[in-house]
Amino acid sequence: MQCTFLLTLLVLVAATLLAQECSGDMPDLSQGWVCRTGDDARWADRDLDDADWQPIEVGKPWEEAGLGEYDGFAWYRLRFRIPESLKDDADFQTYRALKLQLGKIDDVDRTWLNGEIIGETGTFPENYAGAWTALREYRVREELIRWGEDNVLAVRVYDGGGGGGMYEGPYGIGVVSWGDFFSIAIDLGRGDGIFPEEDSFEINAALQNATPRSLTGTLCWQVANDEGAVLLEAVEETSVKTDGTTDGACVFSPETPGFYQVTCIFTPESGDGKVTESMLLGYRPEDIRAPLTRQPDFDAFWANTLSTLAKIDPQFEMIRHADGDTDTHELYTVKMRSLGNIRVAGWYEKPKAEGTFPALLLLPGYSQAMGPTKTSDPIAVLSFNIRGHGNSQEDVSGEPADYWVRGLDDKEAYFYQGAYADCVRAVDFLVSRPEVDESRIAVAGGSQGGGLSLATAALDRRVSLCAPDIPFLCNWEKYFKVTNWPELDQWVEAEPGRSWESLLRTISYFDALNLAGRITCPVFLGLGLQDDVCPAATIFAVYNRLDVPKSYRVYPNAGHWVDPVHQAEKREWLLRNLGSEGVSDGDGT
């Protein structure tokens, strides 16, 4: 997944610096890894015998490195030596620590060195929250280092769907410097990174110096829009005492509501490196107004699509899996026919108790394989796989995972016409079940699943609640201005007659921006402010088109994920509005 221009530049600079730091006598941490699927706490032990573990290449998804189409837990281990010469490094003599970088891991990790936890990113199930776009950098205390002998890294990884594992570097370990003990904290406005002021806003930053000496230098401010255009640059002289904090401020007057990349760079007068902090901040996002891109036959297209779907016999089939039952639910595979007579499927958890129950339809992220939630709540749950996903690949392959360019030449053949119809067919199944109260059907999902949730609520008024997180498929024209997708350029260039205009015309029929006005149920939405996969500007463009009871939560430090606390808050919202004693809180990301 690609970053905005400014963030990409900062990541490249950081990677270059790390590569310089880890050259010379530094061990190469990109080679020699072994891996094992499953989960066992003993695999963190330094003295574990891992000789029979599978060698694996890092820097690519584990699906491409020998594990195949695997989702779930796996562990990576690496043995390496740290040269004793590092003990003589001046910075090490001062700070007594090293720093470890493990790049990006899909989705969640917890990392040990020599049997001691040194860091983790994301949240494992039961409160699963992926963090696959976050760079992992962990500090290693001196007392954990085994000089001149084997050190053992153990990385516990969980992947909930799609690609998984240690898929992108850099991989290195180096001596910390003053910059690792100097931080810049950019003010978050009302607390979530949103500034609701009418005309301008003052951006504040706190400079924290935990080094053993006072630092004098310059603080450079840069503000750019989310398309990379620099709108303001300012420099101020500043100094920060040891173990002290100094505040800096910059006043910025945006011309329009939107999202702005704020970057602060502190450079000491010694010229010995610099510290950079960059955050996307929102200015009056609820005032963003994106024009609709609906074609004249938009409504007719969807009326015809749904009419065609209704004529297809769903042939619902339920296959019991008693070995997957819980104390409260029976487990079934559910199969059905959708648009084009395509076979699709999912996992249905039916309450064992008598009566009627609310139902929750969970929809998959991009290439995610949905599975049972193991819920204990008194609710029916359908974890559904649209065509090409999970157990819905009998007629539509999941490989290659190029869903958003499949059939893009023609709206009548585009992948998401069938995918959206699949979701409506899943609602048909729930309504057909005697244990389901058809007036209480909720839909939820994350990323692609968030976009599918919005589309399902727009196309099917039987949906009574919609809870999308970090939704994909939103405001395409803006989307392609703030992100970079080389495969779309390749698609346009592959055939004569293709153009960006024709591409945008086709996908306008599937843009949640154009569908939002059809949604009639309450919506509860979560997003990560630093998300460069599903940018906040595209999500708010859709949110602001909703004319229903609605609310949102912004997580200011999150990328393409939401904080674990969001799952609990979403669960409470669903519980309250479904009128049930409990609901499932699991959804795809």
Image: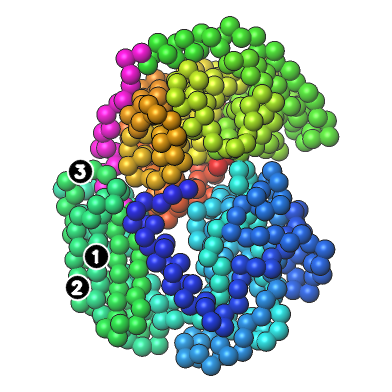
Residue at coordinates 27% horizontally, 29% vertically from top-left? 291
- Distance in Å between CA atoms under marks 3 and 1: 20 Å
* 518 lies above or below 207: above
Q: Is residue 526 visible?
A: no
| Tags 2 and 1 touching, CB below 8 Å | yes
- Distance in Å between CA atoms under marks 2 and 1: 8 Å
* 301 lies above or below 192: above
**Image quadrant where residue 378 sits:** top right
What's the residue type where badge 3 is placed? Answer: Thr
Q: Is residue 226 magenta?
A: no
Nearer-N-terminus badge (2/3): 2
Residue 199 location (% of width, % of height): 16, 48
- Distance in Å between CA atoms under marks 2 and 3: 26 Å
What's the residue type where badge 2 is placed? Answer: Glu
Residue 458 location (% of width, % of height): 44, 22
Q: Main secondary structure of the magenta part?
A: loop
Residue at coordinates 41% horizontally, 36% vertically from top-left? 493
Nearer-N-terminus badge (2/1): 1
Q: Which residue is mark 2?
A: 236
Residue 418 location (% of width, % of height): 54, 21
Q: Is residue 579 left or right of residue 64?
A: left
Q: Which residue is mark 1?
A: 221
Residue at coordinates 60% horizontally, 55% vertically from top-left? 60
Start-end of magenta stretch: 281-297
- Residue 256's tag is 3
- Name the residue nearer the viewer: 458 or 261: 261
